[in-house]
Image (cartoon, rainbow, N blue to C red):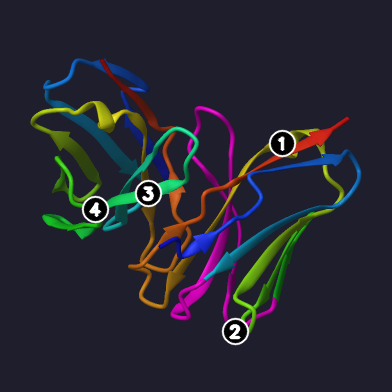
């Protein structure tokens, strides 16, 4: 059973537009959520996180939104740049940080 | 600043051979350490994590094992590799549970 789902395997966006990456989770015990970016043949890089006491966290061009009632979070990238092209992983953990689960990833392509 | 080193970057091994992948962290003490595997076209699967020397938790039963002989050293081993062990192996560290994990560059393991 996949506890963290990213239903879009891929997404293409024009440079300068908004990229929206979605993530759904099933485990109601999750209360800390993270987004990672991964280039080929490299380890994932931490982007941004949000705890369950918030519904929005912003860092530069990246904003994460959390809807706890819907068990849904999203990552917004505005404006999108070609260098943002990568695989984006959503991850979630419980308050103890021991049940740490990654989603399958979404490949974002930003077209010039 | 903290850094994480993983080696080798690529490895080709025959079926039935042993395995030893090493990961070391610098610039921090008593980190949480993690081993993940990313199979082709799939997300990250947590294999092992450690909150201290000699403390290893296994997430997935398999023919792999992990050891933490020193505070900042994490080793992934196998006595006899299977074809299904092929994949991209990633080591990560975190200040504590429920903190962002920081990844190494990974080891691409091919089993022939």
Mark toward the start of the polypeptide (3 vs 4) = 3
Does residue B27 appear in this view? no
For the residue pair B40 and B35, the one nearer the viewer reads as B40
Q: Tag on residue B45?
A: 3
The answer to whether marks 2 and 3 mark residues whose Cβ atoms lie closer than 8 Å is: no
Query: Which residue is labeled 1 in the image?
Result: A85
Residue A51 falls inside the magenta stretch: yes
Residues rendered magenta in the picture: A26-55
Assign the N terminus of chain A to one quadrant of the image: bottom left
Position in image of residue A35 (x %, y %):
59, 56
Q: CA distance from mark 3 to mark 1?
A: 23 Å
Q: Tag on residue A53?
A: 2
Q: Is residue B36 left or right of residue A54?
A: left
Q: Is residue A87 above or below residue A94?
A: above
Circle 2 or circle 3, nearest the eye: 3
Q: CA distance from mark 2 to mark 4?
A: 31 Å
Q: Are marks 1 and 4 on the same chain?
A: no
Q: Tag on residue A34?
A: none
Mark 3 lies on a secondary structure that is strand
Query: Which residue is labeled 4 in the image?
Result: B60
Q: Is residue A98 left or right of residue B82?
A: right
User: Which of the chains bears the disc numbered 1?
Assistant: A
The answer to whether marks 3 and 4 mark residues whose Cβ atoms lie closer than 8 Å is: yes
Q: Are marks 2 and 3 on the same chain?
A: no
Position in image of residue B99 (x %, y %):
45, 64
């Amino acid at each position: 059973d996949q506890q963290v789902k990213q239903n879009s395997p891929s997404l293409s966006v024009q440079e300068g537009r908004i990229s929206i990456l979605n993530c759904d989770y099933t485990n109601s015990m999750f209360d800390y959520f993270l987004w990672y970016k991964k280039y080929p043949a490299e380890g994932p890089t931490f982007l941004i996180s949000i705890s369950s006491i918030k519904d929005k966290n912003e860092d530069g061009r990246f904003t994460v939104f959390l809807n706890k009632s819907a068990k849904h979070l999203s990552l917004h990238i505005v404006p999108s740049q070609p260098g943002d092209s990568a695989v984006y992983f959503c991850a979630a953990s419980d308050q103890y940080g021991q049940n740490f689960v990654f989603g399958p990833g979404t490949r974002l392509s930003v077209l010039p | 600043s903290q850094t994480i080193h993983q080696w080798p970057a690529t490895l080709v091994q025959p079926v039935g051979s042993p395995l030893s992948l090493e990961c070391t962290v610098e610039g921090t003490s008593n980190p949480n350490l993690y081993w993940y595997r990313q199979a082709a076209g799939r997300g990250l699967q947590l294999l092992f994590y450690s909150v201290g020397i000699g403390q290893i938790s296994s997430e997935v039963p398999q023919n792999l094992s992990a050891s933490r002989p020193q505070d900042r050293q994490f080793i992934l081993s196998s006595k006899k590799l299977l074809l299904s062990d092929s994949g991209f192996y990633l080591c990560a560290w975190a200040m504590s549970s429920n903190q962002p994990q920081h990844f190494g560059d990974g080891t691409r393991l091919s089993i022939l």
